[in-house]
Image (tube, helix red, strand yellow):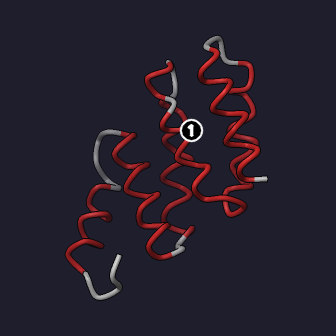
């Protein structure tokens, strides 16, 4: 994301307030990728984790891997998903935790 591209940044900031937790998380990931800002983005992905219920929600977990070691503080929030009833949730959680350690 070009630092001078303010419309794109504004679009991501707006998307981080969307009602859809997946949209918020993906927008936060892209803003982090563009700026390295974890103060605004990590809380968004952390809050989205409460919406993980089924395999359809696994993107809310996997997006955290893109934050790498900056997301280490989220490991305690991820650990309960290691015992989730759905295999795909357990699998993506394990991969995500390995990616951020």
| Residue positioned most to the top | 85
Q: Residue at x 50, y 20 (%)?
A: 55
Q: Residue at x 52, y 44 (%)?
A: 47
Secondary structure of the residue carrying tag 1 is: helix
Return the x and y of residue 27 as percentages of the image width and height.
Answer: 37, 56
| Residue positioned most to the right | 101
Q: Residue at x 67, y 18 (%)?
A: 84
Looking at the picture, does residue 76 appear above or below residue 42? Answer: above
Looking at the picture, does residue 61 appear above or below residue 18? Answer: above
Please state if 77 lies on the left or on the right of 9 as rendered.
right
| Residue positioned most to the left | 7
Please state if 57 lies on the left or on the right of 87 as rendered.
left
Looking at the picture, does residue 89 appear above or below residue 34? Answer: above
Residue behind mark 1:
61
Q: Residue at x 48, y 53 (%)?
A: 44
- Number of marks present in the image shown: 1
Please state if 79 lies on the left or on the right of 14 as rendered.
right
Return the x and y of residue 33 as percentages of the image width and height.
Answer: 48, 67
Of residues 44 and 85, the one drawn nearer to the viewer in this rendering: 85
Q: Quarter holding the N terminus?
A: bottom left
Looking at the picture, does residue 62 appear above or below residue 42? Answer: above
Return the x and y of residue 37 as percentages of the image width and height.
Answer: 52, 73
Within 10 Å of disc 1 (Cα), the crowding (few <14, some 14-19, many 20+) is many
């Amino acid at each position: 994301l070009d630092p001078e591209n303010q419309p794109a940044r504004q679009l991501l900031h707006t998307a981080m307030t969307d009602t859809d937790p997946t949209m918020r998380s993906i927008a936060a990931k892209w803003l982090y990728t563009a700026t390295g800002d974890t103060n605004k983005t990590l809380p968004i992905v952390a809050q989205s984790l409460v919406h993980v219920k089924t395999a359809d929600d696994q993107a809310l977990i996997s997006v955290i891997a893109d934050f790498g070691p900056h997301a280490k503080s989220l490991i305690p929030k991820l650990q309960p998903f290691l015992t989730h009833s759905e295999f795909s949730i357990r699998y993506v959680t394990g991969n995500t935790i390995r990616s951020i350690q």
